[in-house]
Amino acid sequence: MFFTAKIKFGANAIATRINSRQDQALNSFGGVIITSAYNDSINSLEDLKGKTFMAVEKSSFGGWQMAYKTIKDAGLDPFQDFAKMEFGGKHDNVVFAIQNEAVQAGTVRTDTLERMAASGTITMEDFKIINKQNYANFPFICSTALHPEWPLTKTSATSDALTQKVVAALKQITKDNPAAAKAKIIGWSEPLDYSPVEELQKALTVGAFAK
């Protein structure tokens, strides 16, 4: 994670990745909290109390930590208030676990459901979105605050001259570039403000701020 590198090696963000999703350029993402569309017992964050829940993994920012903060802000502690807290290892595993009623609710990063629906793996109508948010110019369903996409960082030992050359090269990458197509990105921008990510991880005592 970025802040582990920042603490250990004096890393700083020098660029932010611009993802390509549904032919749109996106430099932010969020988390989605979902349950089965046929589960009448869960309609709000508060309804998650006493339910079984699955996330991707503890270190996943979009697949757990964003939702964790949203749930805690609603007054719930997943590790105390949920009947069971599990981690599926992959975003698709979480979706399938909810679809198959192995767990009652879960969270994945934004664009997961849309991607799976586009491939024919799932049907969107089979899922209910909890704490749904609406953000201008953001095309995916979301349950949490949005945060910047992943940064490229440099350590304190990296020279400014080399950093400038790397950033200049990255900014020349366009969506038609083979490297961009392979990485499923459009390019790179000036680094966004990552302080909200730092504050979130501090509040949850996760990542570099784990006790």
Image: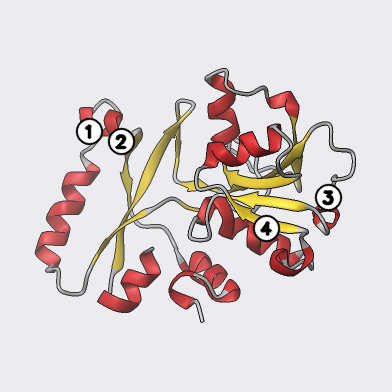
Check disc 1: other Cα within 10 Å, few if <14, some if 14-19, many if 20+.
Answer: some
Mark 4–mark 1 CB contact (< 8 Å): no
Q: Label 4: which residue?
A: 85
* Badge 1 amino acid: Ala
Q: Which mark is residue 183?
A: 2
Vertical side of 48 occupied by 97: above or below: above
Q: Is residue 126 left or right of residue 122?
A: right
Mark 4–mark 3 CB contact (< 8 Å): no
* Badge 4 amino acid: Met
Mark 1–mark 2 CB contact (< 8 Å): yes
Q: Which mark is residue 202?
A: none
Give how far across and how far down residue 80 sits, in percent: 75, 69
> How many numbered tags mark residues here?
4
Among numbered discs 4 and 3, the one appearing first in the sequence:
3
**Residue 92 in view:** yes
Among numbered discs 3 and 2, the one appearing first in the sequence:
3
Give how far across and how far down residue 124 sits, in percent: 68, 26
Indicate the secondary structure of the residue bearing disc 3. Answer: loop
Q: CA distance from mark 4 to mark 1?
A: 38 Å
* Badge 2 amino acid: Ala
Indicate the secondary structure of the residue bearing disc 2. Answer: helix
Dot in front, 4 or 2: 4
Q: Label 1: which residue?
A: 179
Among numbered discs 4 and 1, the one appearing first in the sequence:
4
Point 71% across, 63% down: residue: 78
Check disc 2: other Cα within 10 Å, few if <14, some if 14-19, many if 20+.
Answer: few
Q: CA distance from mark 3 to mark 2?
A: 36 Å
Dot in front, 4 or 1: 4
* Badge 3 amino acid: Ser
Give how far across and how far down residue 14 sits, in percent: 28, 60
Point 45% across, 25% down: residue: 23
